[in-house]
Structures are given as C-alpha cells and as structure tokens.
C-alpha cells in the first residue's frame, strides 16, 4: 500500500482526505511525482509493464462543505494545469479518484464546465453509475479518448479491508473495481 496523507502543514483538523494505492505485487514501480495543488490532493504511481509503462494518478477533491474546499474556479484552473502535464504523458495513463462533482447531473453548470475541460484534453470519463450512497457519480475513472486500454469499471456495495476482514466498513462511497486490458491482451 502506498499512502499519501493530507498535507499536515494545514493545522485545521478534520476527517477525510489523502490518497492511496493498493498494488498487487509483483510490479516494478518507477519514480514519479505530481505538483501540489490548492484545490485537490493527488498522488501517482508509474508501473513498468513488459512492453510499456502505465501511470495512474489518484485525485481527492474535498467537498464544498469542507474547510479544505476551494472555489470551483480554482479547481478548474488547477485541474487544467494538472491535465496539461498528465494528458501529455508519453505512455498510457489513468486518472481516478473522488472529485466531489455530481457528474450524474449534466445540466449543472459545474458539471458541464468539468466535462468540457475533459473534452478539451481529449479525455473520456468511464463511470456511468452512482458511486455514492446519495446516488451521485462522484468517483471517476478518466483515460485518453484514444487509449489502448479497454476500461471495465464496476463497483461493490461494500469496502472489504485489505486486512482480510469480510466486514463492510462504514463509508459513503462504493469501492470502484477497475480492470484494464491493453491491446494485445495484457492486463496491467
């Protein structure tokens, strides 16, 4: 497990935040980093595959009710800057995480601005079912529109801990299970 906790320099205490990766071994990880942004938290891993590389970016944007939240205009500026780097990655990439944007409401101004931003970078969002207990799409999986990855995204109603516990943890989000196949049949 690779965990990136919320930046501790912010003295405001609250729950939530941070990003993490749970990676099944064996895998060859390459050094990677992402800049800090004020409107969302992020982390990344790059994996060396047999014939290529795969970068995965994990995003957490605090909800508007959070003391860590920034105006939506700041998110659009930050995420545009992030995408200008991530979307030009010279190999396959995936952007995933909790964006706290109601993507199930395409008539919402914020949603349409976010989707326009994705479109302007030739990106596709692959989650088309509610990921939150209030029936909203907040958790996203984003790839290049011309990716060689064939994303298959589904969810569970329960988050099972990686400590082999069969019990469900209390959470407002469904766990997203992401399965990708590269052309040629290789599954990262």
Image (tube, rainbow, N blue to C red):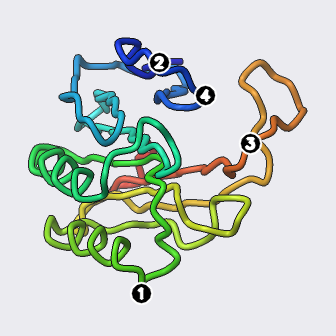
Q: Circle 4 is placed at which residue position? A: 15
For the residues marked 3 and 4, what is the alpha-carbon distance in whole angstroms?
12 Å
Mark number, residue 107: 1
> Callout 4: helix, strand or loop?
loop
Q: Are marks 1 and 3 in contact (CB under 8 Å)?
A: no
For the residues marked 2 and 4, what is the alpha-carbon distance in whole angstroms?
19 Å
> Callout 2: helix, strand or loop?
strand
For the residues marked 3 and 2, what is the alpha-carbon distance in whole angstroms?
20 Å
Q: Nearer the viewer, mark 2 or mark 4?
A: 4
For the residues marked 1 and 3, what is the alpha-carbon distance in whole angstroms?
28 Å
For the residues marked 1 and 2, what is the alpha-carbon distance in whole angstroms?
37 Å
Picture residue at 35% right of the left edge, 71% below the top: 110
> Callout 3: helix, strand or loop?
loop
The quadrant of the rendering that contains the N terminus is top right
Mark 3 or 2, nearer chain start = 2
Q: Residue furthest right?
A: 167
Picture residue at 47% right of the left edge, 27% below the top: 18
Q: Nearer the viewer, residue 23 or 28?
A: 23
Q: Nearer the viewer, mark 1 or mark 3?
A: 1
Mark 1 or 2, nearer chain start = 2
Residue 105, percent across and down?
49, 80
Q: Circle 2 is placed at which residue position? A: 2
- How many neighbours does mark 4 have within 10 angstroms: few (below 14), some (14-19), or many (20 or more)? few
Q: Nearer the viewer, mark 3 or mark 4?
A: 4
Q: Circle 3 is placed at which residue position? A: 171
The quadrant of the rendering that contains the C terminus is top left
Mark 2 or 4, nearer chain start = 2
Residue 43, percent across and down?
34, 29
- How many neighbours does mark 2 have within 10 angstroms: few (below 14), some (14-19), or many (20 or more)? few
Quick check: 74 above or below 108? above
Horizontal placement of 25 versus 52: left or right? right
Quick check: 9 above or below 139? above
């Amino acid at each position: 497990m690779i965990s990136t906790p919320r930046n501790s320099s912010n003295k405001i205490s609250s729950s939530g935040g941070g990003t993490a990766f749970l990676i099944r071994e064996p895998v060859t990880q390459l050094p990677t980093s992402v800049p800090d942004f004020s409107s969302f938290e992020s982390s990344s891993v790059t994996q060396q595959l047999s014939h290529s590389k795969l970068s995965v970016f994990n995003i957490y944007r605090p909800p508007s009710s959070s003391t860590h939240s920034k105006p939506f205009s700041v998110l659009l500026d930050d995420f545009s800057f992030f995408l200008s780097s991530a979307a030009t990655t010279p190999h396959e990439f995936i952007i995933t995480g909790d964006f706290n944007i109601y993507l199930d409401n395409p008539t919402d101004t914020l949603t349409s601005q976010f989707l326009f931003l994705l479109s302007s970078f030739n990106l596709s969002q692959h989650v088309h079912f509610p990921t939150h207990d209030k029936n909203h799409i907040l958790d996203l999986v984003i790839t290049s529109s011309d990716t060689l990855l064939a994303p298959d995204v589904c969810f569970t109603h329960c988050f099972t801990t990686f400590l082999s516990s069969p019990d469900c943890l209390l959470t407002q989000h469904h766990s997203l299970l992401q399965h990708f196949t590269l052309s040629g049949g290789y599954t990262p």
